[in-house]
Amino acid sequence: MLTKRLTGLLNDLIYHVITLDNDFAENYGLTGSEYKMVRYLGKNIGASMKQIAQFLDVSMPRATYIADSLKSKKLIVRKNGEDRRKVLLQLSQKGVDIEQDSQDKYHNISEKLLSPLSDAEKEQLLHLLEQSSNELFGIVKLAAK
């Protein structure tokens, strides 16, 4: 019974995060995939198209299409890697501004969400989420094989 309740709450949480991401993307005039690429490049400066395609779980041509769209919106720039055949992407200043604004919004939401908790409860929640995140990473890694 407890596992069923936890599963329901986790599903609700995931749904709300996805909805929030979609709302943010729409507010910035981006598709969901474009927004995910901006967020990824905010954490992975100079990522290759292959890395981005893997992260987004899309084909290389689809990742290129998304990158082209972001480039036309002046949110990313392309740089040649050491190997001229390898193209690296990074956010333009406009892209950095969007990514930072997004991070600020998530931070504000997190502060409101966690405000009723004591510091001890926040520490406990942090520990439990880290454990769950590590476990989920292992499950996803196994499923990918």
Image (cartoon, rainbow, N blue to C red):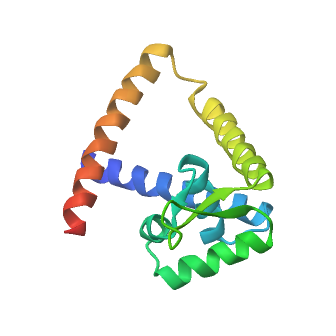
Can you tell which quarter of the image residue 34 is in? bottom right
Which one is in front, 46 or 140? 46
Q: Note whether residue 19 is visible.
A: no
Measuring 73% from the left and 68% from the top, which residue is drawn there?
30
- The answer to whether residue 24 is left or right of residue 9 is right
Residue 66 point in image, percent of width and height: 63, 76
Please say whether residue 14 is visible from this viewpoint.
yes
Residue 92 image offset from top left, x and y in percent = 75, 55
Q: Tell which of 65 and 90 is nearer to you.
A: 90
**Quadrant assignment, res 71:** bottom right
Task: Please state if 133 lies on the left or on the right of 98 as rendered.
Answer: left
Residue found at the far bottom of this picture: 61
Q: Quadrant of the C terminus?
A: bottom left
Q: Is residue 102 above or below residue 111?
A: below
- x 60%, y 35%: residue: 110
How many numbered badges does the structure rendering display? 0
- 121 is higher (above) or lower (below) than 57: above
Front residue of this view, candidates 47 and 14: 47
Q: Position of residue 21 (x, y in %)?
A: 63, 58
Q: Is residue 89 left or right of residue 58?
A: right
Occupied quadrant, residue 89: bottom right
At horizontal 43% and vertical 14% (from top left) the residue drawn is 120
Residue at 48% in and 80% down: 60
Q: Position of residue 118 (x, y in %)?
A: 51, 16
